[in-house]
Amino acid sequence: MNLDFSDDQKFLQSEARKFLEKEQSIQKSRSVLDTKRQYDKDLWAKVLEMGWTGIRIPELYEGLGLGHLELCVIAEELGRSLAPVPFSSSVYLFTEAIIKFANEKIKHEILPKLVSGECVGTLAITEDLFAPTEGNIKVNVENNQITGTKIAVPDASVATHALVICKSKAGIDLRLVDLINNNCEVHDQDTIDNSRGHSLIEFSNANSQLVGETGDGWALLQNILNQAAVLFSFEQIGGAQATLDMASEYAKQRFAFGRAIGSYQAIKHKLADMYIGLTLAKSNTYYAAWALLNDSTELEVAAATARVSSTEAFQFCSKENIQTHGGNGFTWEYDCHLFYRRSKLLSLNIGSLAAWKEKLVSGLERSNLNS
Amino acid sequence: MDFKDTQQEAEFRTTCRAWLEENAQLKAGAGNDDRYGKADERDFLNSAKDWQKKKFDAGWAMLHWPKHYGGLEASAIERIIWGQEEAKFNVPRGVYEIGLGMAGPVMMQYASDQQKARYLPPMAAGEEIWCQLFSEPSAGSDVAGLRSKAVQDGDDWIINGQKVWTSGAHFCDYGIIVVRHDPNAEKHAGMTFFFVDMKSPGIDIKPIKQITGGSSFNEVYFNDVRIPDSQRLGAIGDGWRVAITTLMNERLAVGDANGADAKEAFEWAQGQDDHGQPLIKNSAVRESIADWYCQASGLKNTKLRTMSALSKGDTPGPEASITKVVSANKLQAIGNFGIDSLDMAGMLKTDDADVHSFHDAWLGSAGLRIAGGTDEILRNIIAERVLGLPQDPRADKGLAFKDIPSGN
């Protein structure tokens, strides 16, 4: 029985934490939020130097050839430190999909450049102010050329490539698009969390290459999202732990009516509930990491379980952290809002909480029918 | 990461499994757990005693105990493996949990060698059943507020007062008890701990009828009950420290709430009608089931993390402290959901096993949220011991016990 990370993985995690603290990742995140400059170039360059973008890329393509668990511990630290870098879009969504579904030619062309940072990838799904479905995708592909508009695409302003969900004759395709000099216009969008960049992309007959089989795009997308959900869950539990730590520290130092506010049960019980939610989420996320590592048939349900519980934990912890800080928590100056914003962003970026609860229950129905 | 046993653990599991298969029946389904409080009490006690004796003779009863008291000197992880395997079999449970889970460790730590040799083997063998006498009418969450009196008289102590919520007192042979020997001392300093023969003259036991209709708890009255000083556990005035050790063990003994869980709610929703459609199609129900499933698997995976630490020989983190508060509330919500799903007919008691389990869950969970530490006390413990928040300022600090306001 071993539902835990190895000593090497824990060492990697503690080194990552030290690195991100030294680099003042949270302050950099605030600065990106203030300036809307999409990401922090300096921190991103250092992350590339650390080799983190190549963790999962096989050595054949110049990566480190490590497993998913190494990526999980890094994700937790990026979440804890609100790192303002295009890591999640380029690694969890793009690189993982290329490793799993792209042909050898694409892999040879792109994977080494993802390691070096010459390429940065993203995934473009949403088009409208409602949830995308297999039936409502309008961005179209004809003769390998893509036309239409995607919105809220993460890190599109720094990305060199995007995987695009589009409508083809066969149904839905997953297609690889080079965003540079290829009839793609990128416009940055204002979001609830400008510490991470999001943009609109307008494709006007942009050249593309098919990834996987034509018509299989929607199924591939679900697979990509299930895997990414596990990694995002690690970011979420990292963020939730950071806010619980902030709230506990503040409750010990802040006095009201002659005593530390942490001595009031109203505050204690709030913080205990934060701990309870976080503990459930963390355990579910560890289990999902196991399912991801082993490409288990349980991944769908395990990923949805991790996603739902860590989304709820981070949102709960970040909002109650503001409440614990009182008026100070509502100021721009305190860091509370940075986590509140990030928790909301992460609750939406690969589909809403309601959508993942539905995935969880329909996953249970399928596994129940199969068993 | 993996869920495999180590080779040693796997061998141990096989040994447990082989013995269980020879001596008990596998459970047919999830709902047929043979638990104390459900069946006819006399029959149930007899079958529980038989099963305990069988286990004792083979060494399984208290497998982590030293061999000379009937144990196997098993490790913490082996104890868990045994528990997992035994739980798959339809065997009587619930009678010995408090005695073995609370009285056992405290006797092991504080009794003399002679007493241990006399009391521990029959305790493990189930021949003598033990109860715990801490709570009092005016001392619930604030156990240290207890006021039952102990007055020294030669080699004896004379006990007067009342205990309450004593599980199984009416069939127990011995009990562990904490009482106040000095009302002039500060609250936590004036207590002393003993074990007592429940058949002693002056002990009067009255069952409490609970909201479930059953009576597993009792009031226990002490009128000039004599306890020999040799049955004192720990020094005079050390009662609170000894009690705290015991309460730590209680939280492990109470643990998970048994009964209808996310899986049962899900299966029920697949079969139950909702305006001509299966209930599982109802989006509000789907959302609730997702929430309960996340809680249930969160608890299960938390246990796996605790086991992982034990398996490596590490001390587990504090994560297990969330178990009871989450599971008792989940049980109450699921019981409520099941009853509501029957609409007007939800009020009816029926023979249907599922409906019965929802009624049981709804009523029983109200007690589980209190037993072994209320939701509120458990949250205080998480906040203070895990998160390091300061204690509440206390109105009873530094006062002689007799001067503490009691509201009456």
Image (cartoon, coloured by chain):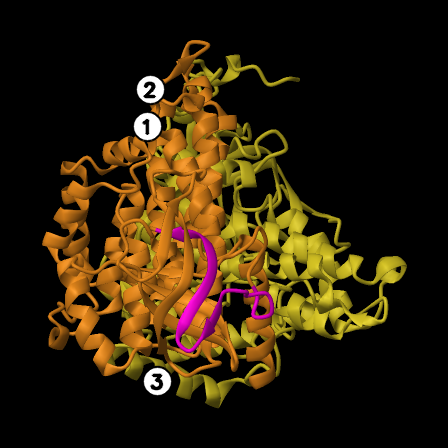
Chain colours: A orange, B yellow
For label 1, the crowd category at 10 Å Cα-Cα, with few meaning under 14, some 14 to 19 and many 20 or more, is some
Where does label 3 land, which residue?
B15
In this rendering, do the residues under marks 1 and 2 share a single chain? yes
Give the number of the mark in front: 2 or 3.
2
Q: Mark 1 to mark 3: distance in Å? A: 49 Å
Where does label 2 land, which residue?
A253
In this rendering, do the residues under marks 2 and 3 share a single chain? no
Residue stretch rendered in magenta on the structure = A133-154
Residue furthest toward the right? Answer: B344
Q: Mark 1 to mark 2: distance in Å? A: 6 Å
Q: Quadrant of residue B31?
A: bottom right
In this rendering, do the residues under marks 1 and 3 share a single chain? no
Q: What element carries label 2?
A: helix
Where does label 1 land, which residue?
A249
Q: Is residue A90 magenta?
A: no
Q: Is mark 3 on a helix, strand or loop?
A: helix
Asked whether B173 or A333 is in front, the reply is A333
Q: In this view, does B42 lie above or below A232?
A: below
* Proximity of marks 1 and 2: CB atoms separated by less than 8 Å: yes
